[in-house]
Amino acid sequence: MPRKQGRQAVRNKAVLESVSWQQRLQRLLLKIVVTLGCLAVLVGVFITGSRLLDLRVEQLVLEGAVEHVAVGELETQLAPTLRAGFLTLDLDEVREQLESMPWVYRAGVRRRWPNVVVIEIEEQRPIARWGLDGFLNHEGEYFPAAFADRWSELARLEGPEGSEHDMTRRYKSLEALLEPTGLQVVALHEDSLGQVSAELHNGVQLALGADHHRERIGRFVALWREQLSQQPVMRVDMRYEHGAAVALLPTSQWAVGDFSAANWQEKP
């Protein structure tokens, strides 16, 4: 009896060892399958990622109402940057390059799957010409651009370097103050000494000096309405504290008087 039990124990042990070995083999095979599966996924991801990184920008789409910027110009401007590829393209760099173009005030850039870059452009809004080679926008910022006939009616502003914002502010103020008279500014100039002068659409030259511009324009408006609107005026110098010097056409004689007076005397 004990011998029979011993043989049974040996047999059970052998069975257990066989089952244990099979389980270990199954676990090993499972690990191999899982590992191979993970490797396959990684390889697939790598291949797919490589293909995605190789995607090129095939098309530029320009959105927004633009008159001075063409798609061809954009392609030329952005050609080196666009070589980076669709997904690796630095959109901030593209935006900065666009906003460096003369007629671009603000730009937006976004991707459109699978290979399109969409560009939105807000163009500059020139309110005046600046010197001989550019414009001032609505914020008084200078931008260089070639003149065209359509902009010939814009006022021409000139001043020392760095005076663009101040000149824009003066121009807007002058236009607003002159509006009741129907007079318009066609040129505004500041010299190296800070002396400001203007030319009006009717040819009248207006000297405003270095300061007190609003007060002097106010006096000019009153003088124009009361005494000068029907006169052949060539030049008005408002740099006097309480009066003005006026040159008339065609004799170019100077007249000096108090703007608030009912009459003024022509200077002999």
Image (cartoon, helix red, strand yellow):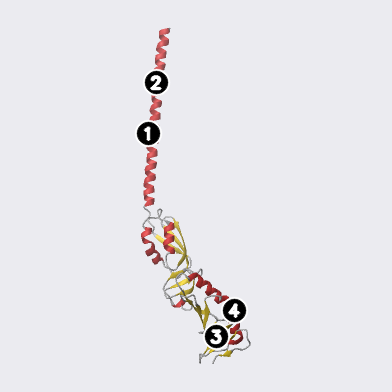
According to the picture, the residue beneath numbered tag 4 turns out to be 218
Q: Is residue 265 visible?
A: yes
| Of labels 4 and 1, the one closer to you | 4
According to the picture, the residue beneath numbered tag 3 turns out to be 245
According to the picture, the residue beneath numbered tag 1 turns out to be 32
Under mark 3, the amino acid is Ala
Residue 17's disc is: 2
Under mark 2, the amino acid is Glu
Going by the picture, which residue comes out furthest to the top? 1
User: Which numbered disc flags the more N-terminal residue, 4 or 1?
Assistant: 1
User: Which numbered disc flags the more N-terminal residue, 3 or 2?
Assistant: 2
- The secondary element bearing badge 4 is classed as helix
Residue 12, compared with residue 187, is above or below; it is above
Q: CA distance from mark 4 to mark 1?
A: 92 Å
Q: CA distance from mark 2 to mark 4?
A: 111 Å
Q: CA distance from mark 1 to mark 3?
A: 102 Å
User: Which numbered disc flags the more N-terminal residue, 2 or 4?
Assistant: 2
Q: Residue at x 45, y 62 (%)?
A: 119
Residues at marks 2 and 1 touching, judged by CB atoms closer than 8 Å: no
Under mark 1, the amino acid is Ile
| Of labels 2 and 4, the one closer to you | 4
Residues at marks 3 and 2 touching, judged by CB atoms closer than 8 Å: no
User: Which numbered disc flags the more N-terminal residue, 3 or 4?
Assistant: 4
